[in-house]
Amino acid sequence: MFYELNDQQKEFRKRVRDIYEREVSPLVEEYERKETFPVQLFRIFGAEHLLCLRCPKEYGGPGLDKISECISMEELNRICVGIGAGIMVQGGLATDPILHFGSEELKQAYLTPAVRGEKIGAFALTEPDAGSDAAGIRTTAVKHGEGYRINGSKTYITNGTICDFMTVAAYTNPSKRGTGTNLFVVERNDPGFSVAKKLEKLGNHSSDTAELAFDDCDVPRWRMIGEQEGGGLEQLEETLKSGRITYGARSTGVAQAAFEAILSYVKKNQRHGEPLKRSQAIRFVLAELAMSIEVMRYTTYRGAYLFDQGLATMKDASIVKLFCTDSLQKIVQKAMALQKSAGLMMENPVQRYLRDARLFKFTEGTSEIQHLVIARELGL
Amino acid sequence: MDFNLSEEQKDVQKAARDFAQGEFDPDLALELDRNGAFPESIWKKACQLGFIGLHYPEEFGGQGLGFFENLLVVESFCRVESGIGSALSMVDLGSEILLKYGSQEQKKKFLSPLAKGEKRLCTAFAESEDGRDLSSILTVAEKKGDEYFLRGKKPFVLMAPLADAFVTLCRESSDGVSTFLVEREKEEINIHPIEKMGLRMIPYGDLHLKEVSIPLDHRIGKGDDGMIHAYQYFRVNGLRSAAQALGTAQGAFDRAMQHAKQREQFGKKLSQFQVIRHKLADMAVSLEGARWLTYKAALDYDRRMNDPESLLLAQLEVGRCLTCVVDEGIQIFGGYGYIAETAIEHYFRDAWAIGVELGTEEEQKDAIAEGILGSDSSKK
């Protein structure tokens, strides 16, 4: 049974925490305010081998396991969720399908530069009318000359305005709902591709989110991921599974930050002349928050362990995401409520944790979708 | 018992709703929220039509109606637009103290301009970041000749940057605190704007009184009775905040319901999914309960029933309703709920700011428990 991180993983946690505190913490306030992603981090993290952690050494990656990726994501999201979003996409949805299903040529062209932080990746699946219902996408990739011609629009795309390339889902055969799809790599300079607009959001301000347009966007044949037409969405299964476990780590990281903030607030402050820490009710609240974080962290790393062993089912992954993202809401809400008006101030990171955390119940499968997945795998 | 509004009350409610629907332009609301700007012209119009201070006596510019009717206006305004509605509800903070304890001259001088939309009033009581904590008031009022000189600091004063006058608590003698009316004179009152997450149209400021002189007749009451005045303010502010919360929760519900009826995924409207239907059912139940508790509390106040318990119950319940309904509302929107240009994103931020005015759950329960168990019951 897996109970504790081994020495190497503990050492890794210490190393990434140091790097993130040194490189990311000083940028958070500025980039949250500017609502842009600090793109210089891609180069810095590339040099530190902190992008695409599970990418094998032959493509320039550190070849680490899922547990290590969760450690890194927990630590990064403890500091900043928005920045965490851009980095997660780079090592997840943008490059995973290339790693698992892409040709050698695709790997050399996109994966290796992504690992080094020389190219920024994005992933484009969601459309204005197809969110939870991914099979409902309308973007098409029709054979045209030597390649494919892509038409459609995508939305909520992380790294949308800053990416060099994006992995795009489109129907090559729209008559086959769900199965007639393929993934293509589109470059930002491809004619016909444009950023329709950058989106303003409740939270995740330092993450770049955009609506993208593909208008007769021609891509050569070699940029289709996989040999044959069809099966694009199926290529995402493992990546989505992995991503759902990562959401456990992201949630645990934000929860930890919110918990540390509220614990120190309660220790330091008085209300109506009484120290807050003497309130029995508040002691109970903090005890429960501490309990939640323990369980979140354990659930996450158990999921990551199962994933590394090749044993994780989609149900396991969905349970991690659903449990952790839900538990997180209670933690950030309580951290906000206890601080009263002080919590509302933009200079107080607790309001940022609240706004940022709210995204986790929508993205990469809403909580409702996670319920559906779990129920389905129960054989219902 | 009669749970129906009177014809006059229905008219007030309808007039408020019509006004709000006609004037609270969603694009303008977005812009004001983004820029942290007060809806100046809508405020003036609302005053011309008698929506501000309709519970003041006619001689001071009101319509002589009850606070309950004022509550209906606040609820209707916030239902249509949480930000603008709240801004218009918070232009006369402290008026309830004048109404109950002010002299004829004070009422004439300070209340009438509020109803006319010429001036705005706010309260500056607490001296910690917690607006309800009056346990340590250090601001001093010193009588010299025919003037009082005030000195001290009041942080986190809601509306301070926009207010023309402040109702403030100062220590006049060692026996207690007294209430004073301070007219704003820019050179003597330092106001620091503080940026916040929600209710961005209503700014906070730190009030710094540096030997501010005011005439003797600007003290409200007999002196050393400031706590009684503060209690009156908190009671009415509780009602007002409950009405804002109720309207905001109802507005979030309206929006979520409309979205659920329009949005299709998996070939069905969201409103056809059982789980979404049940969410809406839960939200409706929560709203109905919170509404009757709030209405009862306002009616008790108008009937001069000195029973604060109904208000405490209402505040706790409406606070829970607000958090749950807005959170479920935004969840029903899915990813759209996270984007600033949708109709619900700022409801989430505003809800948290309104929730702060209601007080923490722990504070509410302390007060309720004291009411049902007796005021000495927690002592050994």
Image (tube, helix red, strand yellow):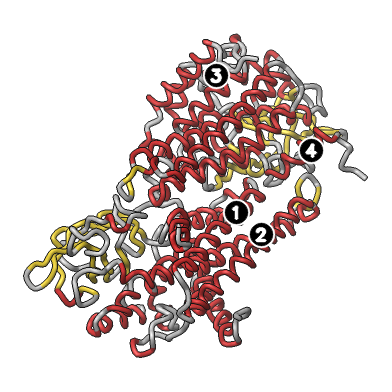
Spatial separation of the CA atoms under disc 3 and disc 1: 41 Å
* B201 relative position to B93: left or right: left
Label ID, residue B299: none
Is B89 placed above or below A207 here?
above
A354 or B287: nearer the viewer = B287
Q: Are marks 2 and 1 on the same chain?
A: yes
Quadrant of res A58: bottom left
Element under label 2?
A: helix
For the residues bearing labels 3 and 2, Cβ distance under 8 angstroms: no
In x, y percent, where is residue A85?
43, 65
In this figure, which residue is indicated by the disc labeled 1?
A330
Amino acid, disc 2: Leu
Amino acid, disc 1: Lys
Label ID, residue A289: 2
For the residues bearing labels 3 and 4, Cβ distance under 8 angstroms: no
In this figure, which residue is indicated by the disc labeled 4?
B369
Quadrant of res A283: bottom right
User: Which quadrant is home to the C terminus of chain A?
Assistant: bottom left
Tell which circle, 3 or 4, labels the residue nearer the N-terminal end.
Answer: 3
